[in-house]
Amino acid sequence: MADGYYPIVNFHYLVQFPFDPMGVTIDVSFQSVSGLDVTLETESVKEGGNNLFTHVLPVRRKAGPLVLKRGLVSPDQSVLTQWMQGVFGNDVFQPMDVVTIALLDETHQTLLAWAVDNVWPTSWKMGELNSMQGEILIETLELNYNQLILIS
């Protein structure tokens, strides 16, 4: 490519939770991460006496949800699963302050990172149990968050 510019590849990343700030446990290894997005909600305002157009004004931002997929991990080996079980099984609601998603290069150095704040689960799904397939059982965690911040 011209001038040595190459697009960043997206297969090497790290999700860091407050209970695992270095992101080194198998507990937080994910097959895929999606939902790093933010949209701007708008409001239409009609100006009195001017019928040519409608003003569209920004109102507020809406982020996510963050969707994480991974192979199912035993609850006794997963702090994250215990957190999900606390919310959905025991009504113990404790949002996480910040979760960080870092895109890494081939030497495991951070190229880009995003932080999402006030994180709490909205959905916890298990993949299909099927005796005709020998696939890894995938669990999907859907997390709500308030704000997406590019930090590097």
Image (tube, rainbow, N blue to C red):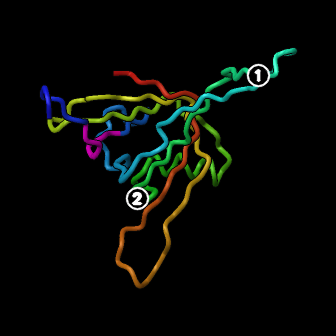
In this orientation, which residue lies closer to the viewer: 127 or 34? Answer: 34
What residue span does the magenta drawing correspond to? 8-14
Specify the quadrant that holds the N terminus.
top left
Task: Pinpoint residue 25: horizontal percent, then vertical percent.
Answer: 31, 45
Q: Residue at x 18, y 29 (%)?
A: 5
Residue 49, image quadrant: top right
The residue under the point 66% across, 24% down is: 60
Residue 147 relative to residue 106: left or right: right
Can you say which quadrant of the picture contains the C terminus? top left
Instruction: Residue type at mark 2: give it.
Output: Val
11 in the magenta segment? yes
Seen at 12% across and 29% down, the residue is 4
- Image coordinates of residue 149 in percent, x first then y, are 46, 24
Numbered circle sitting on residue 52: 1
Label 1 Cα neighbours within 10 Å, binned few <14 / some 14-19 / many ≥20 = few
Q: Secondary structure at mark 1?
A: loop
Q: Is residue 2 left or right of residue 127?
A: left
Q: Which mark is residue 94?
A: none
Task: Estimate the spatial distance between the alpha carbons at disc 1 and disc 2, rounded to whole Å.
Answer: 59 Å
Q: Nearer the viewer, residue 62 or 135?
A: 62
Establish if 126 lies above or below 110.
below
Give the residue number, with chain letter if any, for mark 2.
73
Task: Please tell me which residue lies in front, 64 or 52.
Answer: 52
Q: Write the residue at 37% across / 46% down.
A: 28
